[in-house]
Image (spheres, rainbow, N blue to C red):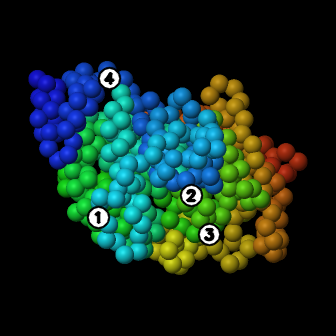
Amino acid sequence: MASIYTIIYFAFSSQTHGCPHCHQIIVTQKFTDNNITMGYEKTNISHIVFGIAGSMNTWNKRQNYSELWWKPNITRGFVWLDEKPPNNVTWAKTSPPYKVSGNTSRFKYTCWFGSRSTIRLARIVKESFELELENVRWFVMGDDDTVFFTENLVTVLSKYDHNQMYYVGGNSESVEQDLIFSYTMAYGGGGFAISYPLAAQLVRILDACIDRYSTLCYSDQKIQSCLSEIGIPLTKELGFHQVDIQGNPYGFLAAHPLAPLVSLHHLDSINTLFPNLTQIDSFKNLISAYKTDPGRTLQRSFCYDLRRNWTVSVSWGYTVQLYPSLVTAKQLETAFQTFQTFTNMSNQPFTFDVQPENPDPCGRPIVYFLDRVEIVGDGKTLTTYKRYVEDLEKGCGNVNYAPALAILSVNVSASSFNPDLWNKAPRRQCCEIVEGSDWVDSGIEVNIRSCNHFESVTPP
């Protein structure tokens, strides 16, 4: 009876508010009691439709970002453009297919400093819904300079009942942005997900709602305001990253929260992820690790070498930090501020803890970046990180620093991360320096593993 009621309710209620065909779409989705039993099919990438906000003006220089994560014939969705590409342009098969957005000249827009294109972008979820694609559980919005990590996106969305109304995403990292725009909205560049039932309600009111909020300047503001009328709050997930920072993203990425990496945005507004690489090549390097172990990417582990009083911090698939001293876990988990706020280029505040870089070269960690990744044996990986040489490192004359500087590379072994762990109480995994792992005193080996009972990262 519950499933019949759901269909009847939408069939009658969707005749108003400018969506006369919504009842047909809802019936197509077949919301039945079988969908919400324990045996229903687990959410996978085929259940997600992506709506990518783009334009002909930006696509040529940003399509490489979309092609990093888009999988032809696997991922579903479209990049929505403001106009049709010229006839002499061949659309790449490696890119998402495109759609041209509908005309929005009838809508009001009274923001004095924004662009009317935000109306078009706000309607992408409606236009995606009205395509009436089959077997859709989630609509995921993003920009043409957003890189999605789709396996982790599926992992995150699988935690939620897609038959309920959910709005999932993340805030800005810069408090100044959240103050100006909102703490209650998902920032569109970092991406956000709207479940099918919520989209079905949203499309009924969206066009009129866009006019009601004509003073709001950006599409994600308009979407959140309309969802507020429905009564649905933002469900925050820490892996959606707007990346509202400027400068060097190293400290931000090296201190990733204990959550699956879902997205990264504003890639042309930050320095390259890896030194001496272009941004595209930097992402290819990160993605090479991600493909071998999606859930472990950027996840952190701390451990001590008590024989030498060293500390190792691993941000898997990206970087290793080696301290020639014992450092507390609290200090290790706090991001080094290698970056500034997005709008004012100031040093604070952010929505996560930061610490200044130590002006004393002897107080800074020795930094290693991902060099290669290998699959070794069944369900195991070996990642190698090579030391990044900076002039500041040469300035430390402390005799205790010299042996650590002699370490040129770090090998990190780990078992494949079980994505089901994200459904349990979160806990950072532990690691250990493998005894006798030094080779000619130029490298060390670290093993990441589940923590033992009562184990902690506590200096003696």
Instruction: Give how far apart the Cα atoms at labels 4 and 2 are.
Output: 43 Å
For marks 1 and 2, the one nearer the N-term is 2
- The residue that mark 3 highlights is 247
- The residue that mark 4 highlights is 40
Tell me whether circle 3 and circle 4 mark residues in contact (CB < 8 Å). no
For marks 3 and 4, the one nearer the N-term is 4
Q: Amino acid at mark 4?
A: Tyr
Instruction: Identify which residue is drawn at 54% across, 39% down.
Output: 96
Instruction: Give how far apart the Cα atoms at labels 2 and 3 are.
Output: 25 Å
The one of 176 and 92 positioned closer to us in this rendering: 92
Q: Left of 324 or right of it: where is 182?
A: left
Q: Amino acid at mark 3?
A: Gly
Q: Which of pointers 4 and 2 indicates the residue nearer the eye?
A: 2
Q: In terms of image quadrants, where is residue 121?
A: bottom left
- Counting from the top left corner in percent of width and height, residue 208 is at 22, 56
The tag on residue 57 is 2
Instruction: Give how far apart the Cα atoms at labels 1 and 2 are.
Output: 23 Å
For marks 1 and 3, the one nearer the N-term is 1
* Label 4 neighbour load within 10 Å: few <14, some 14-19, many 20+: few
The one of 46 and 60 positioned closer to us in this rendering: 60
Tell me whether circle 1 and circle 3 mark residues in contact (CB < 8 Å). no
- The residue that mark 1 highlights is 108
Q: Is residue 112 above or below residue 283?
A: below
Q: Is residue 262 above or below residue 252?
A: above
* Label 3 neighbour load within 10 Å: few <14, some 14-19, many 20+: some
